[in-house]
């Protein structure tokens, strides 16, 4: 899944995953793909992946990366470059969340081309 601002919020996405985990559903029937027979494990994996990605983004900032493009270049180096635009939106969503939590800062309104740094 991709969380893409301005329509998507990483914080809202993670909170929705927490709601799904608490529901204790037996099976999901997604709009595409087969049935998900262990939804709690599936949703926990999605949540874990997002939090690991967020940690990796913060690590890149601590190592000196300052732009989304620089972060994408490293974290998505094995991803088809045609998908880097979508990856940039995902990184942006994470950065918005990190800014809201005062872990990351930028001098201006956050955008895809802003300069970011650890707070």
Image (cartoon, rainbow, N blue to C red):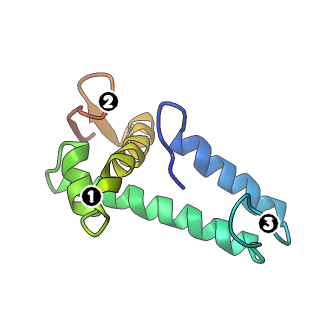
Quarter of the figure that contains the N terminus: bottom right
CA gap, disc 3 to disc 1? 32 Å
Q: Secondary structure at mark 1?
A: helix
**Which of the two residues, 3 or 32, is positioned nearer the viewer here?**
32
Provide the residue designation for mark 1. Answer: 81
Tell me which residue sits at (53%, 39%) in the image. Answer: 9
Left-right relation of 27 to 118: right
Between discs 2 and 1, the one toward the N terminus: 1
The location of residue 2, given as percent across then percent down, is: 50, 51
Q: Secondary structure at mark 3?
A: loop
Between discs 2 and 3, the one toward the N terminus: 3
Quarter of the figure that contains the C terminus: top left
**Which of the two residues, 107 or 79, is positioned nearer the viewer here?**
79
Provide the residue designation for mark 2. Answer: 111
Tell me which residue sits at (24%, 65%) in the image. Answer: 77
CA gap, disc 2 to disc 1? 20 Å
Tell which tag, 2 or 1, sits nearer the viewer: 1
Residue 61 appears in the figure: no
Tell me which residue sits at (60%, 41%) in the image. Answer: 12
Q: Is residue 97 above or below residue 87?
A: above
The location of residue 32, given as percent across then percent down, is: 69, 62
The location of residue 23, given as percent across then percent down, is: 83, 60
CA gap, disc 2 to disc 3? 35 Å
Q: Is residue 109 above or below residue 26?
A: above
Q: Residues within 10 Å of mark 3 (few under 14, many from 20)?
A: some
Tell me which residue sits at (20%, 42%) in the image. Answer: 67
Q: Secondary structure at mark 2?
A: loop
Total marks placed: 3
Provide the residue designation for mark 3. Answer: 28
Residue at the farthest bottom position: 37
Marks 2,1: beta carbons within 8 A: no
């Amino acid at each position: 899944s991709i969380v893409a601002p301005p329509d998507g919020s990483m914080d809202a996405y993670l909170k929705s995953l927490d709601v799904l985990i608490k529901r204790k559903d037996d099976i999901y029937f997604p709009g595409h793909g087969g049935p998900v027979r262990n939804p709690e494990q599936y949703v926990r994996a999605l949540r874990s992946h997002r939090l690991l990605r967020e940690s990796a983004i913060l690590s890149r900032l601590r190592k000196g990366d300052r732009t989304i493009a620089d972060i994408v270049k490293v974290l998505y180096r094995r991803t088809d470059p045609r998908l880097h635009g979508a990856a940039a939106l995902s990184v942006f969503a994470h950065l918005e969340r990190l800014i809201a939590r005062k872990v990351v800062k930028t001098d201006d309104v956050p955008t895809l081309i802003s300069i970011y740094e650890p707070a």
